[in-house]
Image (cartoon, grey):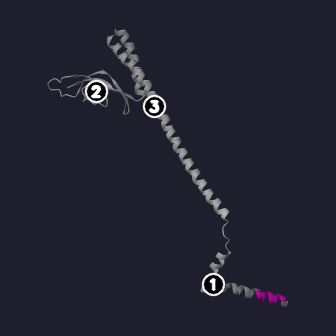
Amino acid sequence: MSEKKNRAAEEKEQAAAAAEPVENTEESAVETPVEEAASAPEPDPALVKAQQEAAEYKDKWIRSVAEFENFRKRNADTRHTSYMEGRADIIVKVLPVGDNLERALATCDEKTKKGIEMVLRSFKALLEGEGIEEINPVGEEFDPKLCEAIMSEPAAEGIEPGYVKEVFLKGYKKGDKVLRFAQVKVTT
């Protein structure tokens, strides 16, 4: 029994010692970080070198991914632009067909006129579907960005010079891009 009492007394002493606050003296505060620093192992130089190489490879990989993404976007834009320009080139080649239909409409008999008007309507619907607009600047001020002056005529009294008097060949544009300049007669 005495052993049990001794053990119980020892346990009480240990519990009391653990419960008591430890005074922080300058010596104990200074010794603790020095002991911790001394106990921390120095990093292996091979490990440090491997970590630096890994960081460099990660940086190169991120840059490569960004470059590829930029290339992919540029390439998609280039393909889209080329496709749209190709479509516009085909339309430009078809425009003379519309011009000929309009000329035929002016010189045909009544039965033929109805058929040509139907074909001409479908031609204009095709152009409209492609977002192509006519440039027909009769009575407007001459704009060299949209028109090509192929003839001039002195302005009559009361009419200002520099205006489009007649259109010989209609022009067409898609958005801001002119597909074909209108050929016009301008007053001087």
Magenta highlight range = 3-10
* Residue 28 circle label: 1
Question: 74 and 5: which one is in front?
Answer: 74
Q: Which residue is mark 2?
A: 137
Q: Position of residue 118 (x, y in %)?
A: 40, 17
Q: Do the CB atoms of the residues marked 1 and 2 lie less than 8 Å apart? A: no
Q: Is 10 left or right of 130, judged from the image as shown? A: right
Crowd rating for badge 1 (residues with CA inside 10 Å; few <14, some 14–19, many 20+): few
Q: Which residue is mark 3?
A: 84
Label 3 residue SS: helix
Q: Is residue 78 magenta?
A: no
Residue at the limit of the structure toward the left, as seen here: 157
Circles 1 and 3: CB distance less than 8 Å? no
**Quarter placement of the N terminus:** bottom right
User: Where in the figure is residue 109, as x and y percent of width and height?
Assistant: 34, 8
Write down the quadrant of residue 125 in the picture. top left
Question: What secondary structure is the stretch in magenta mostly built from?
Answer: helix
